[in-house]
Amino acid sequence: MNELDLNNKSNELKKELMKLNSQIAIGTVPKSPGKVKEIKRTIAKILSINNEKTTNKKQQKGGRKKE
């Protein structure tokens, strides 16, 4: 997936997570409680991939390297 697709997917997941969190705050039980943890992990994976791609681009352009 390219960066645009990853960002779109991340935004969709964040919206879904917000809905689930609001349901939990109200006191209703979500249909699948394990979904919250799964969504959080997926968002973290997407952010990690984006971070990795941006650091690789900076290194290719001659930016500062991590040591």
Image: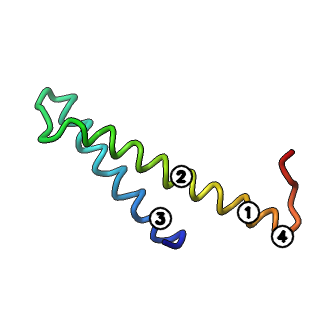
Q: Identify the image's colour scheme: rainbow, by chain, secondary structure or one colour.
A: rainbow
- What residue is pinned by disc 3? 6
Which of the two labelled residues, at mark 1 and mark 3, occupies the earlier sequence position?
3
Residue assigned mark 2: 47
Amino acid, disc 3: Leu
Residue 35 falls left or right of residue 31: right
Residue drawn at the location 41% of the way across and 50% of the way down: 42
**Residue at screen point 42% across, 57% down:** 10
Where residue 59 sits, quadrant-wise, is: bottom right
Q: Between marks 2 and 1, how big is the CA–CA gap?
A: 14 Å
How many marks do you count on the picture?
4
Q: Are marks 4 and 1 in contact (CB under 8 Å)?
A: no
Q: Which mark is residue 61?
A: 4
Q: Nearer the viewer, residue 7 or 60?
A: 60
Cβ atoms at labels 2 and 4 below 8 Å apart = no
User: How many neighbours does mark 4 have within 10 angstroms: few (below 14), some (14-19), or many (20 or more)?
Assistant: few
Q: Quadrant of residue 18?
A: top left
- Asked if disc 4 and disc 3 are in contact, CB closer than 8 Å, the reply is no
Q: Secondary structure at mark 3?
A: helix
Q: Residue 58, image x and y in percent?
A: 78, 63
